[in-house]
Amino acid sequence: MNSAQTLTIVRNTFREAVRDRVLYNLIAFALIMIASALLFGEISIGIQKTILLNIGLSSISVFGLLIAIFLGIGLVYKEMDKRSLYALLSKPIRRSQFIVGKFLGLNFTILVNTAFMSLGLWAALFYLTRGFEPQDIYIWEAIYFILLQLSLVIALCLFFSCFSTPVLSAVFTFVAYVIGNLASDIRTFGELTENPLLGALTTGIYYMLPNFSNFNVSSWVAHGNPVEGSVILWNTLYALCYDAILVTASVWIFSRKDLK
Amino acid sequence: MAAIEISGLSKDFLVGFWRKHRFRALDRLSLQIEQGEVFGFLGPNGAGKTTTLKILTGLIFPTEGTATILGKPAGQPEAFLHAGFLPENPYFYDYLTPQELLDYFARFYPLTPEERKRRCDSVLDQAGLSDVRGRPLRKFSKGMLQRVGIAQAILHEPEIVLLDEPMSGLDPVGRHEVRELILQLKAAGKTVFFSTHILSDAEALCDRIAILNRGKLVGVGQISDLLRRQAGYDAVIECPSPEAIAPLAPLAAKPPLYSGGHCRVQIPEQELSRFLSLCQGDGLRLISLNPVRLSLEDYFVEVLRDTESGRAPAAAS
Amino acid sequence: MSPRTTAPASWKMALLLACGFAVLVPTQMTLNRRLAPYRETPEMIWVPSGKILRALSLGHNGLLADIYWTRAVQYYGRQRVDRKFEYPLLSSLLDITVALDPQLLIAYKFGGVFLAAPPPYGTGEPQKAVALLRLALRENPGEWRLWHDLGFVYYWELKDYKAASEAYLQGSRNPNAAPWMQVMAAVILQKGGDRQTSRFLWTEIFNSSEDVTIRENARDHIDTLRALDDIEELERRAATFHGQTGRWPLAAQELIAAGLLQGIPLDPAQHPYQFQPDGKVTLHPSSTVKLDYGPSPGSL
């Protein structure tokens, strides 16, 4: 019964996103892809594919990030603010199922969105090169890593929206995303500095905040280079682990919250 | 077993910018609602009615005390198998239709797909929504949304239905429809617990009521009992001086009003015979004697005024 | 029947908007002119550090590298078009590009050619080109062609034939390397700067590069070398003619008549060579072949 109930929430979250016309961002993405492909007459041939992949992967990442934050900040707060949560929580379910269901539902939405964008990218690639090379398969690795990153963003949004307003949640999430991307540089900075306090602080930030730089392989893959299998496994473990931490913290906060 | 049992329930909120001040929204509320009765929960705005309902539905957590629904702790999933809830000013996902919404909610109950469909159809009929089952909720008027809200509250045929201000914002037709629904539920043997500040609805529907003011229970019992206790007579007496009616004062429910040789006094029912004998004896000429029919509103205002001024509230029956 | 509102009449609104744009467009055009001086001194802009940019790019370093690469190429092209023939920012732009994406080989190759080439075709900083290519090899150890690019800088601009040969030798050790790498290593060590070797290497660059600018540059060099070869040969035949007739030929026809030529010799730009009275052969005045593309004097 429990998992069926949670699945119901997952499906409804997806339905809400679709009817919210969020998937229309795909149109903007398609336009960018078409425009890029058309402009390629200006650039030397060898680098056209690299540029297309860079534009495509960066667009998937940026659009995914925007959608994730945009939908994510609404996740809990909108329901609370508009009180649709009251009716839902009067059904025989636990609050934890609500949080988990919302989390999975939004991940599924992002997955579908990314899948469509990936198809667009592959279509543009085919149009450009009229055929695929074996190393093109590594592009999926970059897309998979983008999905892992986005799951972290969703978890962050969920966590923040359990106790703060939509605007603040978006700001916190975005700041965490930026710092997370700079994580390795921050740690290097800390290592180079002589100050032990600063060093400890930067190391702490490095391990506590989500390390988004682990997943940045787009430029590597755009040159047809593969990512090692073990890296894929460890990154997956990292993302799942951090997601679990954030979702657990969200459940902890939300289960104790007075809904006024 | 009582349908709803509330015992010593208190709720404090921390208010102020630094959350330092304690605001007691509910103070040691104890109440018992029996199965099958329609119970009205009255009180002015801010009395704590919604707080109580939210504790019963697990939306907020009590500071002290307990609440149970059919013996199970309020707010737990087991309790919700037997209770349905209509929140105040409900909002439902406006991109859904009533059919979709009810189907969505029905999936949280242990029903087979056939039962689910049957229940949804039946409840749509009962709430008079069959014609608009396919229209998106964002196009619904307030009255129609209220009906949707009741529909989703009775979807799983619960024994207990909790309604928070079910009539708020409805036009007369809407109010009538909701009243009919509540009476139908009563006829089917369900327990209905609803909060309202519209006294005429309470009078028309409720078996028993409770009045809450500033978080405290100030009156509970059958309406007829409460009103009878306060009902009495309004007497106008001719008296030469204020001192002359001094012997009557202890009988009166309220201090007498004196003006220009006349005195107006309210005598409770049970003191009537003593009053009449006193009038005959002390040379006070009775000018008029009229029975007072106290309305619930009068009772309500009076009880509130009493608690504001510190007098003891009416005893629970 | 349109609803009667209290809103102002539509024509008034349209007129207001039109007036707004009528003021806006000329204002923008004036701004374009006034801002031109501020935009024309790119040398004054702050040049960011590549490493910092890479950190700030939040994972989009590949895209940013592509953007900087495009800027570098456009900068080079624009300076040429404006006939400025100085490229002070080129080195920084390329450094930023490769800091953002160390695998962007085309950027290294571009620097290898145009940082080494002397003005007006480049910045004349062959040591910078060498440094850039050595960085490229550190980041992309499997790219054997980079050894060729490096060796060529030593060979053509720096005239350091020992270093050039070593570079070709290093590159030839890669199992994927073309066989001529090893051959070149030996030839350069043995013969030093040689026109045939140079033409081979420039042809190799022309065939293997995907960048239009580099290819054009290579083609011009190939044309120059061919023209130099042609001129040498024609001057030899003219000397033969002189020996036979006692005077210098003034036109190709005279050589043809003397059986020393089969047809009118055209330079790579399809212009006929000119025979001067002193026995020298020069290019036609309207020929586009540049003789100064040849290696600096004193070597060949």
Image (cartoon, rainbow, N blue to C red):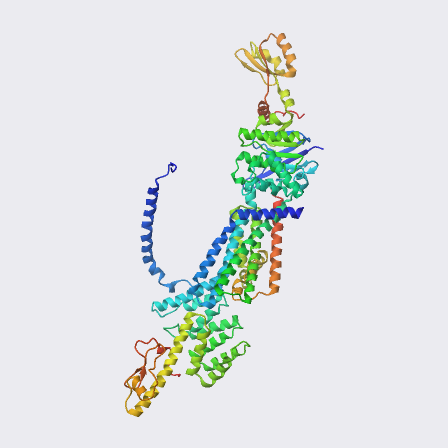
Residue at the right extreme, as displayed: B1
Depth check, front residue: C2 or C97: C2
Q: Nearer the viewer, residue C290 or B32?
A: C290
Quarter where residue A84 is shown: top right
Which residue is rendered at x = 62% and y = 61% of the image? A233
Image x and y of residue B232, in percent? 62, 17
| Res C61 seen here | no
Report if residue C204 is visible in the image. Answer: yes
Residue B35 in picture, x, y percent from top left:
69, 31
Provide residue B202's location: percent of width, then percent of height: 60, 27
The mark tally for this picture is 0
Look at the picture and state if C63 lies above or below A252: below
* Residue at x-position 32% and y-position 76%: C287
Quadrant for the C terminus of chain A in the image: top right
Q: State the residue in front, B200 or C153.
A: B200
**B6 displayed left or right of C131:** right
Place residue B108 in its image quadrant: top right
State the image coordinates of residue C179 (x, y, percent, origin top left): 51, 80
